[in-house]
Amino acid sequence: MTKISKVGIIGLGKMGGNLALQAIDRGYSVVGLDKAELNPELKKAGVVKAASYEDLAKQLPSPRVALIYVGAGPIIDTILESLTKVFEKGDIIIDAGNSYWGDSIQRGNKLKEKGIRFIDCGTSGGVSGARNGACFMIGGEKEAVAHVEPFLKSLAVKDGYVHAGALGSGHFTKLVHNGIEFGMLQAIGEGMDLLERFRNDLDVNGILKCWNHGSVVRSWLMELMEKMYNEKGGYETVPGYIEDTGEVNWLVEDALHMEVPIPVITQSVVQLFTSRDDKKTWAKAIAMMRHGFGGHPFGKDEYLIQFRKNCRVSHYPKE
């Protein structure tokens, strides 16, 4: 089996660009293809920019290996169509973005008809991981995976590589990973809200530092929470609107088809939607009905605020 010495990377943004830099650090040559000009760091590192897909194919040794690092969607099909015109039987294309796993199965089967091998690769670890050591989840046929495995393992952190299974498995595994991430983010966010609303002022900086040293909840996400809380000085300058790329929506829909209950992940997606709701039509509708059946007031009512605090005299009775 030919050892990989040179790879192509299509899409040299934050992820693709940093992976290219890491690959060069590991002794590989990189030919890049991107609409934008190479940034100075990529040029200095020795990334060679291809002028076209034909040029990319000419510069890569056989069997060619090209990684795609662009956003999910029809752009992937456009890139694959262009590559199939210049790649040959036995060449390997790796979609290392966040494509839907069902799309990856269809794309892989279509490429197989032309003799071109396709691998779906979920990449985790963010921009820092791409630059210093990523986490790769691979799906594809064993022979194709075996060819690229030494290369990908060299760019991964120790034990941060798995051939998850057949075609589509890599992107499905990454999708589940993203769903778990959403649930963890929601839990941390709710915990921070509780700290913020405690009756007395708390040393939140100190609490986060403590949690990141020896506690059960210590994690990279908690480290990021501590870092950003310190940098921002709290929450005042941070908008309450949460954006995302919509991938975990796919997982919620998949779970419905699979009849697998995922209440925490589903609720975390719903909470994102709630953060974007500036109209609150649902709340207004409930207020209208409550006013209709019980004469409940519209908006805040100081009497009811105090009533909620004082209306219960005793606590839950013991048996």
Image (tube, rainbow, N blue to C red):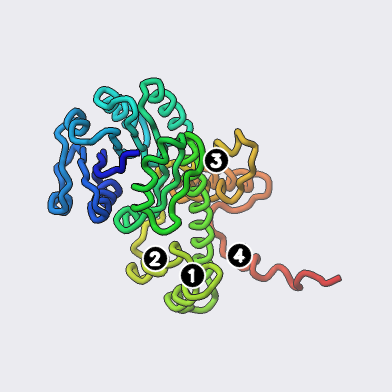
SS type, badge 3? helix
| Badge 2 amino acid | Tyr
Instruction: Tell me the CA gap for discs 2 and 3.
Output: 30 Å
Amino acid type at image mark 1: Glu
Label 2, label 4: how far apart the Cα atoms are = 30 Å
Residue receiving disc 2: 235
In-front residue for pair 272/86: 86
Query: Residue 181's x, y, as percent?
Result: 49, 53
Q: The residue under label 3 is which amino acid type?
A: Val
**Residue position marked by numbered label 1 in the rendering:** 196
How many marks the image carries: the answer is: 4
> Which amino acid does the dot numbered 4 rest on?
Tyr
Mark 4 or 3: in front is: 3
Question: Which is nearer the N-term, disc 1 or disc 2?
Answer: 1
Q: Residues within 10 Å of mark 4 (few under 14, many from 20)?
A: few
Quadrant into which the C terminus falls: bottom right
Identify the residue under disc 4: 303
Q: Residue at x 26, y 22 (%)?
A: 85
Q: Residue at x 51, y 75 (%)?
A: 214
Q: Residues within 10 Å of mark 3 (few under 14, many from 20)?
A: many
Q: Is residue 259 left or right of residue 148?
A: right
Disc 4 to disc 1, C-alpha distance: 25 Å
Q: Which mark is residue 252?
A: 3
Q: Which circle's residue, 4 or 3, is located before the other in the chain?
A: 3
Residue 276 percent coordinates (x, y): 43, 47
The CA span between labels 3 and 1 is: 30 Å
Of the pair 232 and 78, the residue shown nearer to us: 78
Q: Quadrant of residue 198?
A: bottom right
Between marks 2 and 4 in the image, the one whose residue lies nearer the viewer: 2
Task: Label 2: state its secondary structure.
Answer: loop
